[in-house]
Image (tube, rainbow, N blue to C red):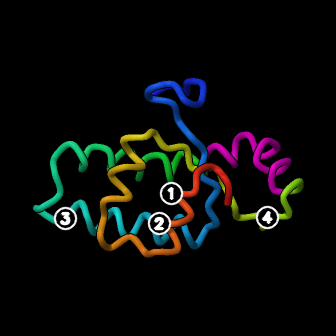
Amino acid sequence: MSALPAGEPGALVPHWLAGADRERLAAVVREALFDARVHPVAAIHLEDVLTELHVAAARDLVWPASAARVRLATGWDDDVLPVRLSADELASLLELPALPDTLRARLHGGSGR
């Protein structure tokens, strides 16, 4: 999916997550993908979330200055990266009962950390 302006259908919104949060999110998503009760469409969105978690790390290796400027301006730690999610991906994540409350609040809160 390509990035669209915020507010547009299908737009990708950055959620700034620390390394531990990204690892926790990946573990919860992997666990959910093994659950037969997850709707097949939600499973596709969750697989896209796993892909974006990998892309976020790769993006920072290739273009480190962009996220570094945000971290410098906000005072966030060096392991905080933007994980860009569509509304459908975010909705699929927020429906997961195993998603920790702190991570749920961080994701539900929008683009800020």
Range shown magenta: 58-71
Distance from disc 2 to disc 4, alpha carbons, whole Å, reads 19 Å
Q: What residue sits right under mark 2 in the picture?
A: 104
From the viewer's perspective, is the residue at label 2 or at label 3 nearer? 2
Going from N to C along the chain, the mark reached first, 2 or 4, is: 4
Lateral position of residue 105 relative to residue 46, left or right: right
Q: Main secondary structure of the magenta part?
A: helix
From the viewer's perspective, is the residue at label 1 or at label 4 nearer? 1
Distance from disc 2 to disc 3, alpha carbons, whole Å, reads 20 Å
Q: Secondary structure at mark 1?
A: helix
63 falls in the magenta region: yes
Q: What residue sits right under mark 1 in the picture?
A: 108
Q: What residue sits right under mark 3 in the picture?
A: 34
Nearer the observer, 38 or 111: 111
Q: Secondary structure at mark 3?
A: loop
Distance from disc 2 to disc 1, alpha carbons, whole Å, reads 6 Å
Label 4 crowd bin: few (<14), some (14–19), many (20+), radius 10 Å: some
Label 3 crowd bin: few (<14), some (14–19), many (20+), radius 10 Å: few
Kind of residue at disc 4: Trp
Q: What residue sits right under mark 4 in the picture?
A: 76
From the viewer's perspective, is the residue at label 4 or at label 3 nearer? 4
